[in-house]
Image (spheres, rainbow, N blue to C red):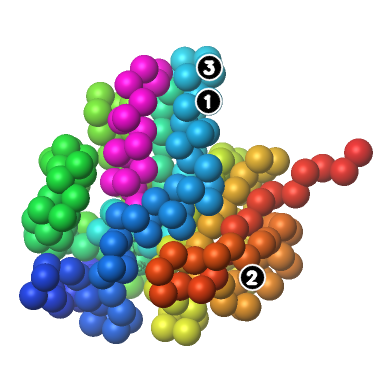
Amino acid sequence: MSEKTAQISWMPSGEPFSELFQDFYFSTDGGFQETEYVFLKQNNIVQRFLALQEAPDDTVFRIGETGFGTGLNFLVTLYHWLQISDLNCILEYTTVEKYPLTKLQLEEAYKTFKKTWPQLSLCCDELLSQYPQEIAHSDDSSSSHQIELFDGKICLNLIINDATLGLKQLLPTEKTMDAWYLDGFAPAKNPDMWQMELFNTLFALSQSGTTLSTFTSAGVVRRGLIEAGFEMSKIPGLGKKREILLGVYPEAKI
Ligand SMILES: C[S@@+](CC[C@H](N)C(=O)[O-])C[C@H]1O[C@@H](n2cnc3c(N)ncnc32)[C@H](O)[C@@H]1O
């Protein structure tokens, strides 16, 4: 059995580079803004959080993600959640990561995060204080870490597994996501993840009102998500990215 954790090289600027996938974890040109644009804006997250102010206490808003990586998408989401001070709802963030960062690697990444995006400092420290010391898993097993932050108002469900296998474990719970962040390296560099079985699993864990977005506009992803049942559109990208994808669960026809 071999253990699998992230194989990272650190750029002089402190940005993590995956040796396994030969790619950067996030845009070296404004990762925070890219996360806000690709994942939060397209899923209309801030407006949906604001609407929760009118929802009954203990309403749960669920976000699902493929590829937790350094947790940047989670931290930016958490940052926006905390901006709305009077929320009594629960944010449940479920993410699947096949090659998790060790706690030491996360500490290294967050040194740069805190310098570059000081507004994330509180969230970085809170996550680091709860991140498991032992995160590795073996080839033939998966593990799941339930991490509670900020007095239990935020539940991070960190599943260590392949995205499809990890998400399939949720099917019997019938918990559906309100929004999906489809991250993971580009399909050309990571074809194993972007498979029909993943797209079908995402659809099975969605419901009316569920939205999804992803940084890629690759045909294989767009066609696969349409085949699974989502309505997909191309949206202009940010910076060098020409286009990204937005998906919605179709409304039932009366
Ligand atoms: C682009 S990085 C994640 C970026 C993330 N937003 C961050 O803040 O670091 C993609 C992540 O997907 C993970 N990944 C790649 N293939 C996967 C798979 N089949 N299942 C689950 N995670 C996978 C990688 O290990 C990596 O952590």
Query: Which residues are drawn in magenta?
Result: 73-88
Alpha carbon separation for disc pair 1 and 3: 6 Å
User: Which is more toward the observer, 101 or 217?
Assistant: 217
* Callout 2 amino acid: Arg
- Image coordinates for residue 144, horizontal then vertical, percent: 34, 50
Mark 3 or mark 2: name the one nearer the start of the chain: 3
Q: Residue 28's x, y, as percent?
A: 26, 70
Q: Quadrant of residue 37?
A: bottom left
Q: Secondary structure at mark 1?
A: helix
Up-down: is 139 above or below 111? below
The picture quadrant for ligand 1 comes to: bottom left
Q: Which residue is at 8% across, 75% downward?
A: 12
Mark 1 touches mark 3? (CB < 8 Å): yes
Task: Indicate left or right for 38 with 158 as reference.
Answer: right
Residue to which mark 3 is pinned: 54
Q: In this figure, which residue is indicated by the disc labeled 1?
A: 51
Identify whether 73 is placed above or below 22: above
The amino acid sitting under disc 3 is Glu
Residue 62 disc label: none
